[in-house]
Image (cartoon, rainbow, N blue to C red):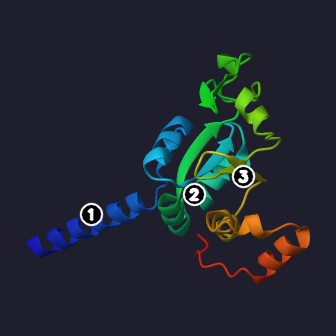
Amino acid sequence: MMKKITLGLIAVFAFSLTAIAQEINWVTLEEALELQKKEPKKIFMDVYTNWCGPCKMLDKNTFGNADVAAYVNEHYYAVKFNAEGNEEVTYKDQTFKNPNYDATKANRRNSSHEFSRYLKVQAYPTMVFFDEEGGFISPITGYLKPQQLELYLKLFQSDKHKEMTSQEQFNEYFKSFTPTFKES
């Protein structure tokens, strides 16, 4: 009986560690920019809204994927940013707010945050990539499955995007890319 209880506890503990290991370590943009000063890494930003269905699917199906979480945690500082929220953001010595934010609409469509407009985010979800110095690289719009996101995570992490000067070069990269992330 004691052996079964011990094995059960070990199984629960092992499952808990697996669940913990599958979570992305989200930080604020300011925290990510500070962390870059000590250990340079690119920044991966999830720009979402509270009412966005595909954003919720991205959280559950893609960001909850163990391969995605492990890769993002190793190679990026991950930031979640509510594109219609009330958070104040400082980026490149400029402060961004949402002056028309309406707290009564917190879970419905609200006014767009100045920072999301600055990043030229026009749809949700959008994932924005920044380089090791916090410089803007590119936005990627729409719901992506783990293997679809893998393509962009590896493209920007490896700096291969810097070698591409045409759509044809990206198409070649896309065609030759072999995903390794497991689909959830």
Q: Earlier in the sequence, mark 1 or mark 2?
A: 1
Q: State how far apart marks 1 and 3 are (Cα).
A: 40 Å
* Badge nearest the viewer, 1 or 3: 3
Q: Position of residue 150 (x, y in %)?
A: 65, 68
Query: Helix, strand or loop at disc 2?
Result: loop
Front-lying residue, 26 or 119: 119
- The numbered mark at residue 100 is none
Residue drawn at point x = 64 percent, y = 67 percent:
146
Which residue type carries mark 2?
Answer: Phe
Task: Check disc 2 and report the residue beneath it.
Answer: 63
Q: Number of labelled discs?
A: 3
Q: Position of residue 58 (x, y in %)?
A: 65, 54
Residue 1 can be seen in this image: no
Q: State how far apart marks 2 and 3 are (Cα).
A: 21 Å
Task: Check disc 3 and report the residue beneath it.
Answer: 137
Q: Is residue 35 above or below residue 146?
A: above
Q: Position of residue 1 (x, y in %)?
A: 11, 73
Query: Helix, strand or loop at disc 3?
Result: strand
Front-lying residue, 15 or 67: 67
